[in-house]
Every structure is written in C-alpha cells, then in structure tokens.
Image: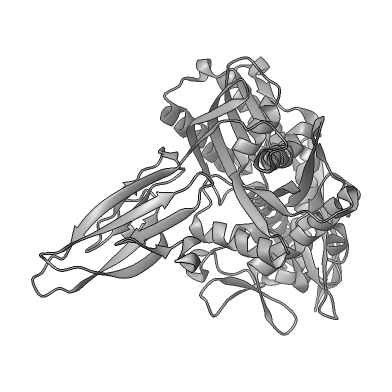
C-alpha cells in the first residue's frame, strides 16, 4: 500500500487513502504534522520532530532545520555563512555532525522514517511506497536527492508529484462542475503559483510560476534581523557574531510571526543570551504587524509577481479565476490574503482551515491510491515548470523541451562537429530559462562521437511521472534507465 507524504521545509505530514477518501495520520508527535527538524544526540543517534525542537536550546549546533532548502544544492550555489553547512566531497551542501559530515538526503531520510513509522502504526503494516510532494520548480538534482532520501528511509518505491497538483486533487475530489483555480502555495521554504482547469475531477495545469528559494523561513529571518538590530542599539552586542545563539533568536522570530497572523503586536523574546563580558542578557523586542509587513513587503511582492506570471502563461485575467486556494503556513499572513482579495475578489479567496494545511498530503495520498488502483484515475495534464536544453559550444543555451510543455514529452536534436578534425563534442544538458548557459542548472554532461561529416542524435525524454532521461545515439546517458542499459 502506498501513502502520501508532504515533506516540507518547516513541517511534514503523512496521509493514507480509505474507502471514504484521504485522511491524515497522526505523526509520532500526536499531531497532523511534525516539525521537519532532525537532531543528532551525543551518542550519534537521530531524533526528529518535536523532540528535536525541544533539545535545540541545549544542542543547537547539532539540531538541523530547513534542510529542504539545501537539498540537492551544490556548495557554490548556496548562501555562505551558515555555520552548520560544509562542502562535501561531491561538491554538494552537507551538514556538520558530531565528528562527521551528514548529507542532506540522510537528514531527510530521518524525517521520512518517522512518517513511515506513524503510517505503519495506523495501517498495521509497512507501506510499500509513497507519493512525495515536491515544489514545482525542483530541478533534477533536488529530485534525485529526494529519491535518495526515500531509499535510505527504506521505501521501495517513491513517486514524486508536484505540490499544487496534490492540493488540486484534495480540493477537486468529488467536484463535478468546471472551475478555474489558482493554487497559492506558500510554505516554509518555497512558493508556487499554479493556474488549473478542473472538470469532473480531471485537472489541467495551464500556468505556473514560483521560487524554491522564498518561503516562511525568509520572513523569520527578517524578524530576527530586526530584533538583532534593536538589541545591538541597546546593548552594544551583535548577536550575528554568535551563530549558535542566533538559532534561538530565529526560533523566537518564528513564534512572533505566527502571533502576528492573528494579533497586531508580538514580542520577539529569547531569555538569557550569554556574552563573555556582560553575562546573561535577555532579548525582548516588540514588533507590530504593520512594521512586519513593511520589512517583508518585497518578499510578498515576489509572490504576487509570480501569480501574475502564472496568469500570463495561462492567458487568463484575474476575473476569469473562480477560486484562489491558499495552501501552506505562510499564506496565513493577513497581508497576503488582503492583496489576493483585492486582485481576485474577497469571496474567491479560500483558506479552508485544516484542509489548507493538509491539502498537499491529502492529495498525495489520493495520487498514491490512483497508482495503487484503489481510486479512480484522474487525468492530470502537468506542465514543465522550466525548460530543459543543451549547450554544445560557446555560451549559447538551446532549449529543447520548453517551459510550459505538457509531459510526457520527448524531443530530439541532431548534432555534428564544427571542425574537420573534430572527433567528439561535449554536450551539457541544462535546466532553466536563462539565455546564458551557466546561469542555468546543469543536469549532466557527456562526450558524443561526432565529426563535421557525421551527424549524431540526442533525445530528452520526460515520462508521465516527470523523470528525465537523456539519450545519445540510442543509449541512455542520464536517468534511471542508465542502470538497466
């Protein structure tokens, strides 16, 4: 039996499919969700969820959060300065554990193990596989890292499905009328805006945009920076020079952010901040909702720009959207709801209580049941969120499968050498939409036998589950089929 998993930047959850539909499973934390936190104890064991959060004060160096934001990222891509991060031998971002480096997939696997255990307790048996929800613009390295984590967690089968489609499945279950829906999915580390056409339970994406590098964690950081600046003005101590203590400040900022979603004023409070000269000092800074909205206005504006981009891609106006579905914790922010209500109309914007928090997990469970044959298959027309193409010579990037194409899709290109004595050409496969090749994300590179007279064929193939395979002269040079080949 397959289950549905929503692995998020700040929280994660799991759901199963019953005869009556999808339902949430209480995690090991006895709630519908668990913090996506992992802590390494003194004996080298891992704890996850709330136990990891609870030990953060005494074990901040080895309590790891926001792992999803660094998953599948090369060291040169990430923002330096995070003291827990290190460059692995593979050039990827790793984490500093007790006497060793820990890969991001290894930490994600610990969260997945906890979710699998919760499912096993409810089902009375081990899940055979899972549909794991991912952000729209996760690139190939991030997808491979998620699959690696699933394997480490003991999952025999892991299918990746984009988060807005999961939310749409949860929303459209049993719905018969035609509707055009904008899914505004704003989680802890990522944002997606997706325009969908839904009819009789079938879903077609017609526009999408977003960012895998903007989310609730950025709002936490802005509040933390505000508190640190105020503290420096009063005490003359810069907390940013004490990165371990900043972990506690960030946690306090996150708590204040949640309060500001329902109150006009909140305190960012961290007791007993220690300094060698001044001893123990408490941090307590008051912030108003209007101040918070001002300091994060650019982040909110980025999401609204993505909404407009998704509408443009769909060829729709705001008046043509029937429903705006708010998903993810950061979408609770009153400013966000107000802006969307101004754009689309107050009655169109929906945040359906627990379903808004759980829609992705519930939809993933629905998709799992379709794969298992326990639910009626729905038609899902999924779009390519970014282009995939090649660079052969110079700095020119040639998109082969363009953004907005519906997959499954296969595109071929024929190449030949540029010089008479040339025997091979280097082909670099890239993902992205920047004109200059190195501004896109590299998927793979390989040498292709090819001279000025002989032509060679390559093909990019994206299957119905979004898996990319790269073919060169009839053989697979990248993708899961490479092992079989």
Instruction: Report the residue at 49% width, 39% height from top.
Output: 209
The image quadrant of residue 263 is top right
Seen in the picture, residue 102 relative to 318 is either above or below; the reply is: below
Seen in the picture, residue 65 relative to 357 is either above or below; the reply is: below
In this orientation, does residue 223 appear?
A: no
Say whether residue 421 is left or right of residue 28.
Answer: left
Instruction: Report the residue at 40% width, 51% height from top.
Output: 461
Seen in the picture, residue 19 relative to 4 is either above or below; the reply is: above
Instruction: Report the residue at 83% width, 75% height from top.
Output: 45
Say whether residue 166 is left or right of residue 463.
Answer: right
Residue 394 at what x, y percent from top left? 22, 63
Instruction: Report the residue at 52% width, 70% height from top.
Output: 75
The image quadrant of residue 240 is bottom right
The image quadrant of residue 142 is bottom right
In this orientation, does residue 125 appear?
A: yes
* Of 148 and 217, the residue lying toward us: 148
Q: Residue furthest left?
A: 420
Quarter of the figure that contains the C terminus: bottom left
Residue 325 at what x, y percent from top left? 65, 28
Q: Residue furthest bottom?
A: 99
Residue 49 at what x, y percent from top left? 83, 58
Seen in the picture, residue 196 relative to 454 is either above or below; the reply is: above
């Amino acid at each position: 039996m397959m289950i549905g998993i929503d692995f998020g930047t700040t929280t994660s959850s799991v759901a199963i499919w019953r005869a009556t539909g999808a339902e949430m499973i209480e995690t090991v934390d006895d709630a519908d969700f668990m913090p996506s936190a992992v802590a390494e104890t003194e004996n080298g064991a891992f704890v996850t969820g709330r136990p990891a959060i609870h030990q953060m004060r005494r074990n901040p160096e080895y309590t790891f959060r926001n792992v999803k934001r660094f998953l599948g990222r090369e060291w040169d891509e990430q923002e330096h300065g995070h003291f827990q991060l290190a460059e692995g031998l593979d050039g990827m971002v790793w984490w500093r554990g007790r006497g060793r480096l820990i890969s991001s997939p290894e930490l994600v696997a610990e969260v997945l193990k906890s979710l699998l255990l919760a499912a096993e307790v409810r089902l009375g048996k081990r899940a055979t596989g899972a549909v794991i929800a991912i952000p729209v613009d996760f690139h190939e390295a991030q997808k491979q890292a998620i699959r690696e984590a699933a394997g480490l967690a003991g999952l025999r089968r892991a299918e990746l499905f984009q988060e807005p489609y999961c939310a749409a499945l949860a929303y459209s279950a049993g719905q018969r009328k035609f509707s055009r829906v904008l899914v505004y999915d704003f989680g802890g580390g990522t944002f997606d805006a997706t325009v969908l056409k839904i009819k009789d339970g079938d879903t077609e994406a017609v526009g999408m945009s977003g960012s895998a590098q903007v989310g609730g964690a950025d709002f936490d950081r802005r509040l933390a920076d505000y508190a640190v600046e105020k503290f420096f003005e009063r005490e003359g101590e810069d907390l940013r020079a004490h990165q371990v203590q900043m972990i506690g400040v960030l946690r306090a900022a996150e708590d204040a952010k949640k309060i500001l979603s329902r109150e006009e004023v909140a305190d960012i409070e961290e007791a007993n901040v220690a300094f060698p000269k001044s001893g123990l000092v408490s941090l307590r800074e008051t912030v108003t909702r209007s101040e918070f909205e001002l300091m994060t206005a650019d982040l909110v504006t980025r999401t609204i720009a993505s909404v407009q981009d998704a509408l443009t891609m769909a060829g729709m106006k705001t008046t043509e959207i029937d429903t705006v579905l708010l998903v993810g914790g950061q979408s609770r922010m009153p400013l966000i709801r107000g802006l969307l209500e101004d754009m689309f109309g107050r009655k169109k914007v929906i945040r359906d209580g627990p379903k808004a928090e759980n829609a992705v997990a519930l939809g993933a469970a629905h998709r799992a049941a379709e794969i298992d044959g326990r639910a009626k298959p729905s038609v899902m027309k999924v779009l390519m969120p970014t282009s995939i193409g090649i660079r052969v010579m110079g700095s020119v990037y040639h998109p082969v499968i363009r953004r907005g194409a519906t997959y499954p899709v296969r595109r071929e290109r024929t190449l030949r050498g540029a010089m008479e004595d040339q025997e091979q050409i280097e082909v670099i496969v890239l993902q992205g939409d920047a004109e200059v090749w190195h501004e896109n994300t590299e998927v793979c590179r390989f040498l292709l036998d090819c001279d000025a007279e002989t032509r060679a064929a390559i093909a990019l193939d994206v299957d119905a589950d979004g898996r990319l395979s790269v073919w060169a002269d009839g053989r697979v040079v990248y993708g899961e089929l490479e092992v079989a080949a």
